[in-house]
Amino acid sequence: MVQKAVCVLKGTGEVTGTVHFEQQDEGAPVKLTGEISGLTAGLHGFHVHAFGDNTNGCISAGPHYNPHNKTHGGPTDEVRHVGDLGNVTAGDDGVAKIDIEDKMLSLSGPYSIIGRTMVVSKQKQLGILSFLFRRNIIYPRAHIAAVGRKPCISRRRKKPTLPLM
């Protein structure tokens, strides 16, 4: 069964965006599409964090989502946090187009990312920053939002309802 989710980002300043998630079947890759605007030009880290609580920024969102207790890595690495999605690139207009397919994310089952927090960091991932993450040093991040299921329309009631797990 196709699973869909959406994350609406509202960051500090004028950063906003929407990321859509779609997974054809449990175990299939998750397709992420969308757009984030208001960023500085260049690379920005993009990750799923452990908790859906963004009341106190990245502190309450917790670390990268890492249910298998792996080390930090890039999106194509065999060994990585589930939440490590690499970088998104914002153009000179401050817009990053999202078009990612990830084989470790899931929208269902015990390792679902539903209800967790997405973070777009002010700085790129890997290189020197992977060194910082391995030592749990926090660096400034700005733009966060929780991932939620897309509502589906009931044929009887014609108003949005959330699908049951």
Image (cartoon, rainbow, N blue to C red):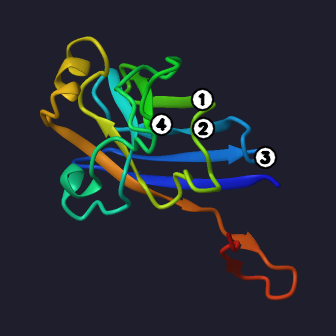
Q: Are marks 3 and 4 in contact (CB under 8 Å)?
A: no
On the rendered structure, is 102 left or right of 63? right
Task: Return the residue at label 4.
Answer: 82
Depth order, front residue of 2/150: 2
Q: Residues within 10 Å of mark 1 (few under 14, many from 20)?
A: few
Q: Position of residue 76 (x, y in %)?
A: 53, 18
Q: Position of residue 72 (x, y in %)?
A: 34, 26
**Can you name the residue that lies furthest to the front here?**
69
Image quadrant where residue 136 sits: top left
**Can you name the residue that lies furthest to the top here?**
127
Q: Residues within 10 Å of mark 3 (few under 14, many from 20)?
A: some
* C-alpha distance separating marks 1 and 4: 17 Å
Circle 2 or circle 3, nearest the eye: 3
Of label 3 and label 1, which has the lower sequence position?
3
Depth order, front residue of 146/92: 146
Residue 56 higher or lower than 39, as above or below:
below
Q: Position of residue 20 (x, y in %)?
A: 60, 47
Task: Return the residue at label 3.
Answer: 25
Identified at 20% across, 13% down, the residue is 128
* C-alpha distance separating marks 2 and 3: 15 Å
Q: Which mark is residue 32?
A: 2
Residue type of the residue flagged with mark 2: Leu
Residue type of the residue flagged with mark 1: Asp
Quadrant the C terminus occupies: bottom right
Identified at 69% across, 74% down, the residue is 164
Residue 15 higher or lower than 129, as above or below:
below
Residue 92 higher or lower than 58, as above or below:
above
* C-alpha distance separating marks 3 and 1: 19 Å
Element at label 3? loop
* C-alpha distance separating marks 2 and 4: 14 Å
Of label 2 and label 1, which has the lower sequence position?
2
Task: Return the residue at label 1.
Answer: 99
